[in-house]
Structure formats: C-alpha cells, structure tokens
Image (cartoon, rainbow, N blue to C red):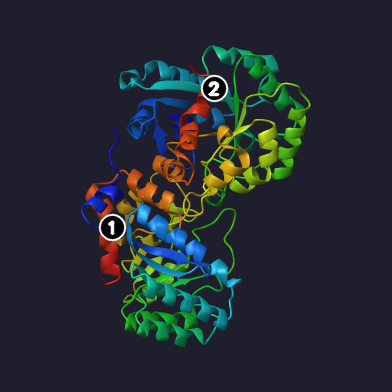
C-alpha cells in the first residue's frame, strides 16, 4: 500500500500549504489554471506577483509595472487565498512610490524584484528601507552561479549576502534555490546570514537539495515556493529525506513567521 | 509501474553514491515493480566496460531480490571505444538494453558508426536509450565542457541516417529538453522513437508540458524514467500523475509502453 502524500494529510487536518513565490497573469485563463492546481495540491495561500514575462521586457516601464500590480490587486480582492507582492523595477524611480502605495493598501511583501538590474546602492536602499518600515519580506530573483557563466543584471548569492549583511533588519528571500544553477554554492554563500531565507521553488529536481539546505541553514529559513511549478515543488518536499515536522515547517509554518501572518 | 532509467554508483559532480539496494528502497514505495539500472561509471570511465562489469558484480551481490521487484541491467556503451560493432552482441547475455550518451562519452550522434551499433543491438534484441542531459544544463560543473552538442540539427541528421534503413530500431531519447522534443515531434512519431519527461524543463502543472507532448508525440511513445538518484523521484512522477491527461494514458506512460519497448512479458 502506497503512503499518502503529506500535502493530502495536511488537507485532512484542515490546513494547507503556503506558497511564498508564485505568479499571476494578465490573462485570466492562466489564473484559473493556477487556482485549479492550488486546489489539487492543497495550497491554502499563495503570495503572488505579476508574471514577469507578461510585462514584455526585463526592464518594464513604470506604467507597465503599475498595470501588473493593479491586476494582482484585483485578483487578490476576488480571491482571498492570494496575497499580493509588489512587483518593482528598481530602474524606475517612480516605482518606489508605487511600492509604498501598494504596501499601504495591504500587500504582503516586495518582489519578485526581477532581472532589470542588480539590487545595489541607492536603488536597494530605498526598497529595503520600505521593507523594514512596513515589516514585510522582500523576495529577490537570484541566479545561482549558472553554467557556463552568470548573466548580467541578475542578482547572485553574493549580491544577496552583501545586501543582507548591510541591512540585518530586512527579511530577504533569496528566490528559487531550485530554479537553476549551483544550489550547493548558493547555500554555502548565505548559510551564516540569518536574515536570508531561501525559497525552494523552480524546476530543478535534484535530490538532496532540501537535506543540504536543512544541514547548512537550519530548518527555519526554508520556505515552500512553487514559482508556478507545483509538480516539481511538491514532489521535492514529499521526496526529501527529512522529518515530517520539518516538511510541515517548510510547507507552511516558516512562511507564517516570515510574513508575520 | 516501470522505471526505465535509474543509476547506481558514484556521480562525479555531486555527493551521490548508491547501490541497487538503495535504488529499490527509494523507488519501490512509489509502486514501481520493474526497475532498469545503469552504472554511472559506465558513462564516466574512459573504459566504459569496467563500469558495466562493476554493475554486473553489484547485481550478483545485492540483496534486492527479497524486495519483490524486478531489476534489469542497462549497459553504458561508447560506440567509439570498441574495436568492432559486433562486440555489442555480447551485451545481450546480461543486459536488457544499451545506453549511449553522446554528451558524456564525447561523440557525435549523427554518424554511421552510431547507427551501426543501434542496428546490431536491435538484431540481438537490445533496445537503445540515447541519454540527453543528466541534470539541468545551468547547474553543470563549470569544469565540464561538451565536445559535441545535442542540437536539434544534429538530432535531425541522426534521424536521417536512421531513416535509410528499412527496419525501425527500438530507440528512446531519454532526458531531452522540451524544446527539442517538441520541435522533433513529427520525426519522433514517424520513426516510432520513445521518449520521456524527466528533463527539468518538461514541466508538469500548471504549464502541462506532459500533456502537450502527449498531444504532439502520442501517449504510446512516452515512457517513465526517474533518473533516481539524481532526482527526487516524486518531482518526475507527479508531472505524470497530476498531468491533465486521461488515466489510461498515464498507465501507458508509467507501465505499458516500457513493457513494449523492452519486450517484457
């Protein structure tokens, strides 16, 4: 007899998974798909930002960013299981005010800060200060030492480490440790930085990643995320050779703490 | 269910060291009854045959038999590291199929010697699995450099060579990117080549690429390969189990097609 997956057991206990990194779309057909799969996989709540590729560019204009965030707001109002994250292009000076506006009306965090530029200097300062002031986490897209080489304008684990050390009061989520790249390196770089959390979203299916993350970071800094790839994301947690209590922390409890929910 | 590709041995780029018993321990609880195993070393030793010999020894010594699963051995073969293509025939004694790995053995797929090997293998009842990527290309060890790529053009050239022969060989493309499988869907279908959904960029829900492949290639030509222990098995399994395809199609992918491909009773 095959054992029942933990995500189904949680459903029977009346609780669900919390997804800290998912995206919604400008097109509602895809959003309906997302809701459908959230139900199948017992995802109780998802922290969502607009899907970056819906914005047409890695460097979208302020108007496009506003349009994307407005769509997220609309969807969150319609579906209370969605919690808004403010998408921001740090290269648009007006986006800083936009972030504050959306945090004021109840968005739960900043991000995913995507690939227009590395998050450094004055640009980073404004965003991080807002995150601290509003007591919300900031989710930063990160590429983890790609083969054969890193891409320009994309944050690396070193960038995340530098930022987190400079702003120890900020709660920084280093995105999708399993999103492609050298996750062993990424874990090593941020292991001793206690205000860096990792999300385990993305497409990479490598065995051992969660076990290694627990070993290096401890269980409390690991957050469940799908980045919209639920089969891989749930399969990763279900397969990992770690205790069930740890899996529950990853599936939901750690997110409740990081988002002060 | 049948898993057509798992590994034992040592993987050189991550801390992975497993034996057949470990594989059974991981896979059997998911409901698999038939498991195909290859030794990593047959892909990474220069003399691939040493790896195959190690696998045979391991098979004889391991205790998996009490676990009520069937283990079948796959031989890793470098077509350019044998003196005669007829040497392939001897593998039919102990192995259920061959695996060729152009990326890891460093040869060009689209050449006559490869096709000759496939023909000889098929003559003695050995299907051939062509292995694509073992892991997401973005996480390769930076010291590694592929001598030959597995581009769409190269694979098309290879298909042209295959088409020259009247008989369709039993062939599978395992762990190939979605883009390649999609672009080559027509040829894959015409040549009755099997494939799988284990590569990282073949997504499951909500971008149901498994469903798209079934629509493009057909449910009769997709088998299940987990690549355990490189991957978490449920990552690959859930892509199929939770795909929006009919249950009978899942059954074909997870079992019936592999039976046909390997000619299992």
Question: How much space separates mark 2 and mark 1, taking CA atoms?
Answer: 41 Å
Front-lying residue, A238 or A27: A27
- Quarter of the rendering containing residue B222: top right
Which residue in the protein does label 1 denote? Answer: A16
Residue plotted at (38% across, 47% down): A235
Residue B160: x %, y % from top left: 77, 33
Would residue B75 be seen by someone viewing this image from the given angle? no
Residue plotted at (62% across, 39% down): B217
Residue B111: x %, y % from top left: 75, 31
Q: Is residue A235 left or right of residue A117?
A: left
Residue B243: x %, y % from top left: 47, 46
Q: Residue furthest right?
A: B164
Does the residue at mark 2 contact the one at mark 1 (Cβ under 8 Å)?
no
Chain to which mark 2 belongs = B
Residue B215: x %, y % from top left: 59, 43
Quarter in which the C terminus of chain A is drawn:
bottom left
Above/below status of A211 relative to B99: below
| Tag 2 secondary structure | helix
Above/below status of B106 relative to A13: above
Numbered-mark total: 2
Front-lying residue, A132 or A52: A52
Which residue in the protein does label 2 denote? Answer: B262
| Tag 1 secondary structure | loop
Front-lying residue, A114 or B156: B156
Above/below status of B102 relative to A103: above
Other residues around mark 2 within 10 Å, as few (<14) / some (14–19) / many (≥20): some
Residue plotted at (52% across, 44% down): B135
Other residues around mark 1 within 10 Å, as few (<14) / some (14–19) / many (≥20): many
């Amino acid at each position: 007899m095959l054992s029942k997956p933990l995500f189904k057991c949680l459903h029977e206990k009346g609780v669900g998974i919390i997804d800290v990194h998912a995206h919604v779309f400008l097109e509602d057909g895809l959003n309906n798909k997302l809701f459908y799969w959230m139900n199948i996989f017992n995802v109780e709540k998802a922290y969502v930002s607009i899907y970056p590729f819906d914005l047409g560019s890695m460097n979208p204009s302020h108007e496009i960013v506003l349009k994307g965030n407005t769509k997220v707001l609309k969807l969150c109002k319609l579906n209370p299981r969605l919690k808004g994250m403010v998408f921001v292009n740090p290269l648009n000076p007006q986006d800083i005010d936009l972030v504050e506006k959306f945090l004021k009306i109840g968005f739960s965090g900043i991000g995913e800060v995507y690939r227009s530029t590395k998050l450094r200097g004055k640009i980073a300062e404004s965003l991080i200060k807002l995150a601290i002031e509003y007591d919300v986490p900031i989710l930063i897209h990160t590429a983890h030492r790609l083969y054969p080489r890193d891409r320009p304008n994309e944050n690396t684990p070193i960038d995340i480490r530098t930022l987190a050390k400079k702003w120890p009061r900020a709660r920084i989520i280093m995105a999708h440790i399993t999103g492609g790249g050298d996750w062993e390196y990424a874990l090593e770089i941020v292991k001793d930085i206690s205000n860096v959390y990792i999300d385990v979203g993305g497409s990479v299916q490598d065995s051992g990643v969660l076990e290694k993350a627990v070993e290096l970071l401890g269980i409390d800094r690991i957050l469940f995320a799908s980045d919209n790839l639920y089969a891989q994301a749930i399969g990763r947690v279900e397969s990992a050779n770690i205790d069930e209590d740890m899996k529950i922390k990853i599936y939901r409890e750690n997110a409740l703490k990081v988002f002060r929910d | 269910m049948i898993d057509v590709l798992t590994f034992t041995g040592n993987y050189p780029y991550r801390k992975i060291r497993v034996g057949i018993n470990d594989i059974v321990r991981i896979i059997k609880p998911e409901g698999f009854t038939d498991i195909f195993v290859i030794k990593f070393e047959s892909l990474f030793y220069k003399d691939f045959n040493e790896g195959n010999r190690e696998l045979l020894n391991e098979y004889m010594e391991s205790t998996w038999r009490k676990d009520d699963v069937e283990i079948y051995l796959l031989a890793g073969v470098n077509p350019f590291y044998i003196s005669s293509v007829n040497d392939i025939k001897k593998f039919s004694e102990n192995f259920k199929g061959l695996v060729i790995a152009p990326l890891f053995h460093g040869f060009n797929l689209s050449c006559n010697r490869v096709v000759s090997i496939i023909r000889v293998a098929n003559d003695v009842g050995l299907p051939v699995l062509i292995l694509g990527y073992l892991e997401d290309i973005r996480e390769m060890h930076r010291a590694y450099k592929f001598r030959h790529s597995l581009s769409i053009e190269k694979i098309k050239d290879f298909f042209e060579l295959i088409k020259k022969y009247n008989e369709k060989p039993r062939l599978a493309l395992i762990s190939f990117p979605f883009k390649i499988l999609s672009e080559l869907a027509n040829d894959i279908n015409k040549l009755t080549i099997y494939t799988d959904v284990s590569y990282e960029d073949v997504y499951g829900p909500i971008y149901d690429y498994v469903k798209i492949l079934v629509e493009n290639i057909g449910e009769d030509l997709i088998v299940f390969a987990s690549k355990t222990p490189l991957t978490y098995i449920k990552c690959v399994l859930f892509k199929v189990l939770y795909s929006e395809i009919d249950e009978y199609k899942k059954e074909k992918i997870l079992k019936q097609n592999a039976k046909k491909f390997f000619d299992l009773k």
